[in-house]
Image (tube, rainbow, N blue to C red):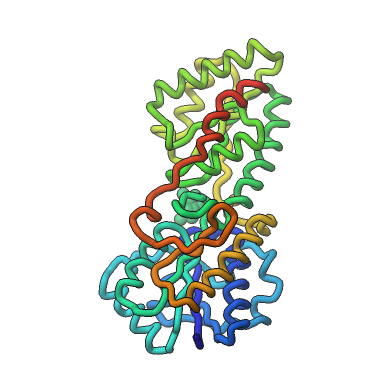
Amino acid sequence: IKKIAVLTSGGDAPGMNACIRAVCLAAISVGADVIGYKYGYNGLLKQEYIPLDQYVVRNLLQRGGTILHSARCEKFKHPEQIELAAKHLEDINVDGLVVIGGDGSFRGAKKLQAVWDKPVIGVPGTIDNDITGTDYTVGYHTAIQTAVESLDKVRDTAEAFERIFVVDVMGREAGYIALNSAISAGADHVLLPETFTSAAEELVKILDKLDKRRKNRANKSHIIVITENLWPGGLNVLADSLQAESGVDVRILTLGHVQRGGSPVWQDRLLATKLGTYAVELIQQNEKGMMSAISHRLPAAIPLNDDTLTRKELNTYSMKIRDEITLLG
Ligand code: F6P
């Protein structure tokens, strides 16, 4: 192998830089040159790339964001653009491409692999942790850490005023961040896309839990974690109903994009380093259309197919304990 290319695509995630570094250093160690395409697949289509070497990636391990920038690329859904991308890779003699991103980026990688005969390897990089076939995605642990720190802080003010707080966390259509940040911060209720039924039914469950907890304890504060875009009509509708029914003051906190930023926690640095290095190994082995994944703590090559590109199911034990555990506080 003489030349490896890397790009970051879709929602950026803490640890993407660490992964770029790992790909770069692993490639250099097998004697290959490395280039980084900018702005995801857009850079591939516009032939916008930069050379990467050990000096460029110095101190990247701990830096949030992605030095290559990221983007969602609508154009990359069109077959002629994908052919063009393959041609651009051929024109400059790239021997393998590493795509760091989420499920949308992997769909693009799969299409590119169908028209290019050199390896395209995906590395799961998204805070959502919603990719089947890998235990974790790069960025997920840092996002949870950010959410947990915020929930701890909100708890202080909620207790002081005896208020209900509805805290909106990211995850798109996956409840991983909500479920595990809620358990880790000892939130009192969690609403997940995987189990949401209807506003009416969920409201009854929330009020029921609120009631039980108020009987058990003097303080009326209550923290509810919810995955983004879940409540029909938006969170003001939920807050108004809750306030009217409970007589307790309700406040909404949307954590938003802070969950995508910051220095990656050690779990994401380690994961990014393992998966980036393994992606280069897969290219060396001429493996095509694979995800460099982590499965039962070991690197694994998982084909980018319809199974991988479906949303990963939530951890069954976390689901089992979420209601028991949130009733205790
Ligand atoms: O996929 C990562 C993610 O942060 C999701 O959790 C969220 O739904 C989405 O990206 C937000 O995208 P954008 O930054 O384009 O608003």
Seen from the viewer's position, the closer of residues 279 and 227 is 279
Quarter that holds the C terminus: top right
Seen from the viewer's position, the closer of residues 200 and 5 is 5
* Number of marks in the rendered image: 0
Point 69% across, 64% down: residue: 62
The answer to whether residue 70 is left or right of residue 155 is left
Q: Quarter of the image holding residue 120?
A: bottom left
Point 55% across, 86% down: residue: 33
Seen from the viewer's position, the closer of residues 98 and 65 is 98
Is 326 above or below relative to 180?
above
The answer to whether residue 12 is left or right of residue 144 is left
Point 71% across, 14% down: residue: 218
Where residue 295 sits: x, y (%)? 53, 55
Q: Is residue 75 visible?
A: no
Is 186 above or below relative to 308?
above
Where residue 237 sits: x, y (%)? 45, 28
Point 68% across, 28% down: residue: 158
Q: Quarter of the image holding residue 84?
A: bottom left
Q: Residue furthest top?
A: 215
Is 174 above or below relative to 188?
below
Q: Is residue 225 visible?
A: yes
Where residue 161 sits: x, y (%)? 70, 24
Where residue 153 sits: x, y (%)? 71, 37
The answer to whether residue 94 is left or right of residue 219 is left
